[in-house]
Amino acid sequence: MTEIRNVEQELSRFRVRLAAAALFVLVCFGLLLARFFWLQSVKHEQYSAKAEDNRISVAPIEPNRGIIMDRNGVVLARNYSAYTLEITPSKLQDTLDNTIDQLAQVIDIQPRDRRRFKRLMEDARSFESLPIRSQLTDQEVARFSAQRFRFPGVDVHARLFRQYPLGEAAAHVIGYIGRISERDLERIDDTSEANSQPNVTYDPHKDANNYSGTEYIGKVGIEQSYETELHGLTGYEEVEVSAGGRPIRTLSTSQATPGNNLILSLDINLQRMAEQLFGNRRGALVAIEPETGDILAFVSKPTFDPNLFIEGIDSATWNELNSSPDKPLLNRPLRGTYPPGSTYKPFMALAALELGKRTPQWGMADPGSFTLGNHTFRDDAPGGHGWVDMYRSIVVSCDTYYYKLANDMGVNAIHDFMKPLGFGQITGIDIEGERTGILPSTEWKRKAYKRPEQQRWYDGETISLGIGQGYNNFTILQLAHAVATLANNGGVMKPHLVKAIEDSVSKSRTLTVPSESYRIPIKQANIDVIKHAMAGVVQAGTAAKAFAGAQYAAAGKTGTAQVFSLGKGEKYNHHAIPEYKRDHALFEAFAPADHPKIAVALIVENAGFGATSAAPIARAVFDYYLQGKWPAELAATAPKPQPQPPVDTPSVFSTGKTATIASATAMPQAAAEAAAQNAAQAAASGAAGATAAKTTAGAASAPGASAVVAGAPRAAPPISADLVAPALREAGTSAQAVAPSTLDAQVLQALSHVQPAPDLPSPRGRGMPAAPSSAPAASPKDRKPAVKPNPKPAPKPAPAAP
């Protein structure tokens, strides 16, 4: 039976479905319109800003780092432009190892380059561009550019590199820069936070955003201590980019401000000469201008080449430097502490005069020993020195005189007098890492030890202090500072290494005057007594041979310091003990004696007698600084005359803290370096700056845009463009086949603006001293006997390892 269709019923159902569908569509459109209203009206400003950010990339422009020069304008640290091959790991389409293997067929990549790159990756983010090869040659740049299409995520970037042209010279003073580490970032953030406090005057140099795009920072030495001055102010460039992140045009540029230049107080010729005089021996020397506190030489031997650290030192070289028993990385004048030996005696004598314990005329018959309780302290002269007054006690270096003097004064009186002279105190020199050393007192010992029997001070411990032994441990910088204060008749000048700061924009120079200048209240008559005795040391005493024939009057004191104590009845045998246990040789002096222009303190480790090992070095330093004489044994390395004016220095105790001098005193070499850097900065203004490092906070950019923008060249001396064609032929590609999409136009432009890198020292075989020669035989003069406190001394600490 055929069912009759109910048309009306079906039509009714259709209308219901149609109405439901229409309602659904209307609801959807309503929601869509509501969303449009929300996005375009309510959230208009927010999304408009985001869209603008996607269209505009803000790239930091890294400032040129300031140069460092000596007092005569010799450049010690400079910048140069070169190209690096860099990889952005997140953009690689192949594995990292395969990419590097293929790159090695185009550009020479050594195993040490791979190791360094992988170390950089450990501390970097995947989107950062990291260098795998630096200082590419012109041919290498051209060869890679011709085949760049094969290596997505790999690019050639123009960079400014730091260079230390004199290599090892003054390395511990200048220091070096290195890649920013997590610790550096924390320090930058802490400084920035402190800089933003309401009660602090804001300094843009200390803002964390000032390190956007910066990959390197000062690690040690002047490079670290004056980082704020040397770094400059970061600039920014707004670049319109395409959807793919490629730059279209530059919208605006805020130029970077180069870092300020530093003029050091060092005389680099004097510095290099002193370093050479040490030869392969270990030691330290500090030379100071007494009236100003200018440090003229600051020697630490052995030394190292700071160029090794700029791009990351390879593990083999690092292990060689770090594990060397000679400790070339140790800044000996700043951090090595030593007993002063007999160089302490002039200050003991001065203390005796000031405290009324002795007069210049007071004398004694020296029996050759001093007995306290059941212990006998012996002199180096078995039969004694005969009748000894204060003058003769210094000239012949009589131990017995100072054994008795120390016993009469007491440890706390010695401490209280020596402290204002700077012994056991921070001098305040303008590089970080200075050690205090030890100026002992009863209070010091209570704090240094825990057990009651160790905390007690024994009388026998005081005796050894008189001859500069026992717990006495000072840096060579402290000893030089004290000698300079004595030479300056009690005027204390804060030692400093930076003499002036040259503004990168105005080129005016601000002289850095010590922040503290004061006089120790010491009677001039007493100072004259000590100076007269120290002059006698040079004229007829232990240093007479070293200064024979000098055309100027000098004053000084030799010293020999024990490294370890001898047992009862033991005799010191220079040849029978290991070298590291042999005595240290010391010498302190100033010249001319009547109006000192230079004061020196030095130590030659494990070299024996100060008169034969240390005093001749001081003589050569004085000859050069006062008379311009270069040692005959170093004639082959004598510097050529450089008639460049030194930076003027205000007189001692001047009322002004700073002074500005005209740029007319600028040194020729320094001016050339600064001009070259400014030219490089101007040429780089069209580029987007350096690749953002870990400190790229605040520099927003679209994905992929920063690497392209950062790859633009920064410096511009031309080379031949004909390099491109051979590279194309070598790659088997015609110039027509390489479209701009595969051979980036910016790299082609870079090829016409590349500057070859200067020759740098090889990373191998530098910074390590030759095998040490046998130390000269120790003379018995100034030899100090072992001192055993009476009755039960606390354990004596070993001297700090230099």
Image (cartoon, grey):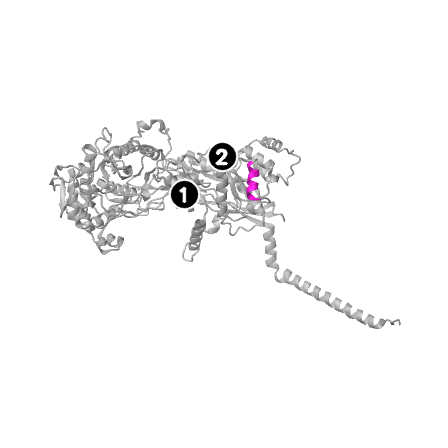
Cβ–Cβ below 8 Å for labels 1 and 2?
no
SS category of the residue bearing label 2:
loop
- Name the quadrant of the N terminus: bottom right
Q: Main secondary structure of the magenta part?
A: helix
Residue at figure coordinates x 26%, y 53% from the top left: 449
Residue 709 location (% of width, % of height): 57, 44
Picture disc at residue 757 = 2
Q: Which residue is mark 1?
A: 223
Residue at figure coordinates x 81%, y 72% from the top left: 12
Which of 207 and 795 lies nearest the eye of the viewer? Answer: 795
Residue 556 relative to residue 642: left or right:
left
Kind of residue at badge 2: Ala
Determine the image quadrant of residue 766: top left
Query: As displayed, is residue 105 above or below residue 123?
Result: above
Q: Earlier in the sequence, mark 1 or mark 2?
A: 1
Specify the segment rendered in magenta: 95-104
